[in-house]
Amino acid sequence: MQSAREAAAGHPRVVVLRADPGMGRSRLLADLRAGHLYGAYEVIPAEVPPEPDRAGAPFGTVAERAVFVLGRRDGKRLVEGIRRWGPGILWLCPDLGAQEAWKAVRPRPTSDPRQVAEDLSGLLRDLASVAPVLCTLDDLQNLDETGAAILLHLLRALGGNLRLLLAMAADQRPERSAHPFLRLAQEAERARLW
């Protein structure tokens, strides 16, 4: 709990909750959100389903919520941002293209995972310049290759008012050693990103 409070206060930028399945990670995240622990932070919760229906889950949810919050807080910054990071965000959230702000700019979606990750980082940085942002991401053990690449990029790009609170099952079975999340975790630990 203390680490979560420190994350909300700005130190450290990444907190990882790791526990066996059924030990209450998701419940802890929900309780922290419900308890208004984060104060002035815009909290953007997302989780990775066991069988993601779209590459890059849960970052479509993160992007959609961030766009909504940025539009509510600073519509002009949203329109300006769409020009910079619209292509990757449209790949994550194709339905956004039907909204007026997006129609006016008409960004072309990109499927390049590196560009998608950079565009999501840009969106979150723009939002973090308006209000502190805390993304809570649950069930990361279910990440696919694209989601793991996006998260690794976000970990490297963290700064300013952007924080991550990550939760995952502590599943270290040998048959899962090639799983995208475990490779991401090894890289993040090696690079001291968490």
Image (spheres, rainbow, N blue to C red):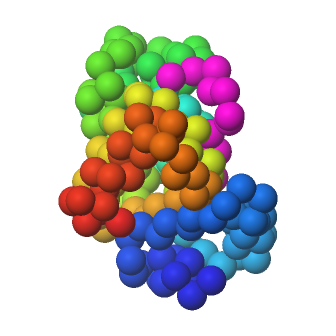
Q: Residue at x 49, y 66 (%)?
A: 16
Q: Nearer the viewer, residue 70 or 22?
A: 22
- Residue 182: x percent and y percent? 42, 46
Q: Residue at x 31, y 67 (%)?
A: 160
Q: Is residue 25 a member of the stretch shown in magenta?
A: no
Residue 7, relative to residue 124: is it above or below? below
Q: Residue at x 38, y 52 (%)?
A: 185
Q: Residue at x 41, y 35 (%)?
A: 178
Residue 135, relative to residue 10: is it above or below? above
Location of the C terminus by quadrant is: bottom left
Tell me where residue 10 sits by quadrant.
Answer: bottom left
Location of the N terminus by quadrant is: bottom right
In the image, taking residue 49 as reference, residue 60 lies left or right, namely left
Residue 114, relative to residue 10: is it above or below? above
Q: Is residue 43 a member of the stretch shown in magenta?
A: yes
Q: Look at the image and give the residue range highlighted in magenta.
A: 42-55
Q: In the rendered picture of this protein, how many numbered marks are placed on residues?
A: 0
In the image, taking residue 20 as reference, residue 114 lies left or right, namely left
Q: Nearer the viewer, residue 58 or 98?
A: 58
- Residue 165: x percent and y percent? 52, 64
- Residue 119: x percent and y percent? 32, 34
Can residue 166 be seen at all in this image of the molecule?
yes
Residue 103, relative to residue 2: is it above or below? above
- Residue 72: x percent and y percent? 58, 48
Extreme residue in the bottom direction: 2
Extreme residue in the left direction: 191
Tell me where residue 53 sits by quadrant.
Answer: top right
Can residue 73 be seen at all in this image of the molecule?
no
In the image, taking residue 122 as reference, residue 178 lies left or right, namely right
Q: Nearer the viewer, residue 191 or 151?
A: 191
In the image, taking residue 154 as reference, residue 169 lies left or right, namely right
